[in-house]
Image (tube, grey):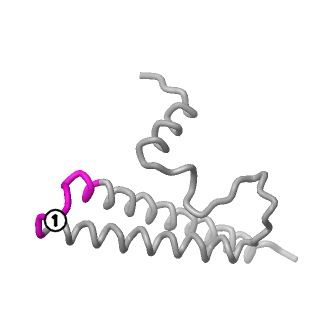
Amino acid sequence: MVMNVSDALSAYRQVNGISGIAGAKPAASKESGGFGELLEKLSNETIDSLKQAEQTTAAGAVGKANLTDVVMAVNKAEMTLQTVVSIRDRVVSAYQEIIRMGV
């Protein structure tokens, strides 16, 4: 089955209720927060997502939460964590590349 990439992305965003990478600002934004602020916001959103998934899972274990809500919260936390790990890997790779450069 051949699928358009933009259609797949929009479907993914619609299902997960996100508009892009967590913490990322649109390119046309007038705000210039900087890379440090972006990383801080991303880490805070990641922590919040993981805490929410943990709370929802605990509520589901005692029968106070719907199974669908538990699965969605855990899925969102997993995707957020995968995004953070991917960004970390890219930053480490870029740092290693800069270190290898001759001045």
Looking at the picture, how far across and down is residue 74, in whole percent?
31, 61
The span picked out in magenta is 62-71
Image point (34%, 56%), residue name: 75
Image-quadrant location for residue 66? bottom left
Image-quadrant location for residue 41? bottom right
* Disc 1 residue crowd, few under 14, some 14–19, many 20+, Cα 10 Å: few
- Viewer-side residue, 3 vs 44: 44
Give the residue at the far top of this rendering.
1
In the picture provided, is 7 more to the left or to the right than 91?
Answer: left
Q: How many marks?
A: 1
Image point (35%, 69%), residue name: 52
Looking at the picture, how far across and down is residue 58, in whole percent?
20, 72
Give the residue at the far right of this rendering.
103
Q: Quadrant of the image for the N terminus?
A: top left
Q: Is residue 87 above or below residue 69?
A: below
Image point (60%, 64%), residue name: 23
Amino acid on which disc 1 is placed: Lys
Give the residue at the far left of this rendering.
62
Q: Where is mark 1, residue-wise?
A: 64
Q: Is residue 11 above or below residue 60?
A: above
Looking at the picture, how far across and down is residue 71, in whole percent?
26, 55
Looking at the picture, how far across and down is residue 19, in whole percent?
56, 49
Image point (45%, 62%), residue name: 80
Q: Quadrant of the image for the C terminus?
A: bottom right
